[in-house]
Amino acid sequence: MHLKRLELAGFKSFAERTELEFVQGITAVVGPNGSGKSNISDSIRWVLGEQSARSLRGGNMQDVIFAGSDSRKAVNYGEVSLTLDNTDQQLSLEFSEVTVTRRIHRSGESEYFINKQPCRLRDITELFMDTGIGKESYSIIGQGRIEEILSTRSEDRRGIFEEASGIVKYKTRKKEAQKKLEDTEQNLLRIHDLISEIE
Ligand code: ATP
């Protein structure tokens, strides 16, 4: 699985629809200060579901929408699509190419798509779980992240190893199942109360 293509439109400094093709191997993005290099990595984290505006260097999420410049007026929505080669079927979808898209409107509402089909953020999170690609995972190492990882509490560091070993999916499912069990126990208690009231 590798990153094939990134398309940005109305995202941060990328007002026009811009397409970046990534070939196998190493790609370096070079450019003067403030030309938008970091905006590219921000866009990858954003399309993967980043919910923190601060970590995208903004005050609120709408700040990722192109805000206008001297020569061009602001746009109403921002959109990023990320396409991965999935010929090795590492992502559990029967497509050789998988494209995830996120669109945000000035209202702050985000829409998500997998291969152009509307989906929930949760579907995207689950798709990338244990693949190392998720927004929090180790495939995106930002400035200062290495020191952060090394200085962080060992329990937090453990999350990185859990993602790499592929057990996050099972831990998440276990947590959901435990929550359902607790809810069911509460419902049963309520039913018992009601029955004893009737009797
Ligand atoms: P450096 O090399 O200094 O780290 P960089 O190439 O990584 O710089 P970025 O931080 O990616 O640059 O881009 C910063 C530019 O993006 C700034 O010029 C800023 O005005 C522009 N920018 C950020 N958000 C928006 C937005 N919503 N609308 C328009 N332009 C934006």
Image (tube, rainbow, N blue to C red):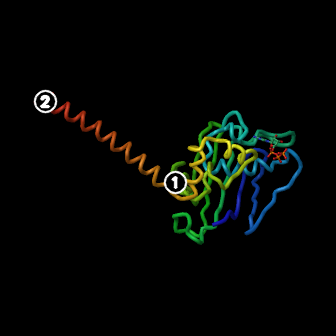
Which amino acid does the dot numbered 1 rest on?
A: Glu
Position of 33 with respect to 112 (left or right) is right
Tell which quarter ligand 1 is in.
Answer: top right
Look at 58% across and 60% down and name the residue there. Answer: 115
Q: Locate residue 80 relative to residue 111 in the image: left or right.
A: right
* Front residue of 91 and 61: 91
For label 1, the SS is: helix
| Displayed quadrant of residue 91 | bottom right
How far across and down, in percent of the image, does residue 127 sit? 53, 57
**Residue occupying the far top of the picture:** 197
Q: Nearer the viewer, residue 35 or 172?
A: 172
Q: Residue at x 87, y 39 (%)?
A: 70
Label 2 with label 1: CB-CB less than 8 Å: no
Give the Cα distance between marks 2 and 1.
Answer: 44 Å
The tally of labels here is 2
Q: Badge 2 is on which residue?
A: 198
Q: Residue at x 68, y 42 (%)?
A: 151
Q: Position of residue 81 (x, y in %)?
A: 66, 55
| Disc with the residue nearer the chain's start (2 vs 1) | 1
Q: Secondary structure at mark 2?
A: helix
Q: Position of residue 97 (x, y in %)?
A: 61, 67
Q: Residues within 10 Å of mark 2 (few under 14, many from 20)?
A: few
- Of residue 148 and residue 5, the one placed in the foreground of this image is 148
Name the kind of residue labelled 2 in the image: Ile
Mark number for residue 126?
1
User: Can you say whether 84 is above or below 68 in the image?
Assistant: below
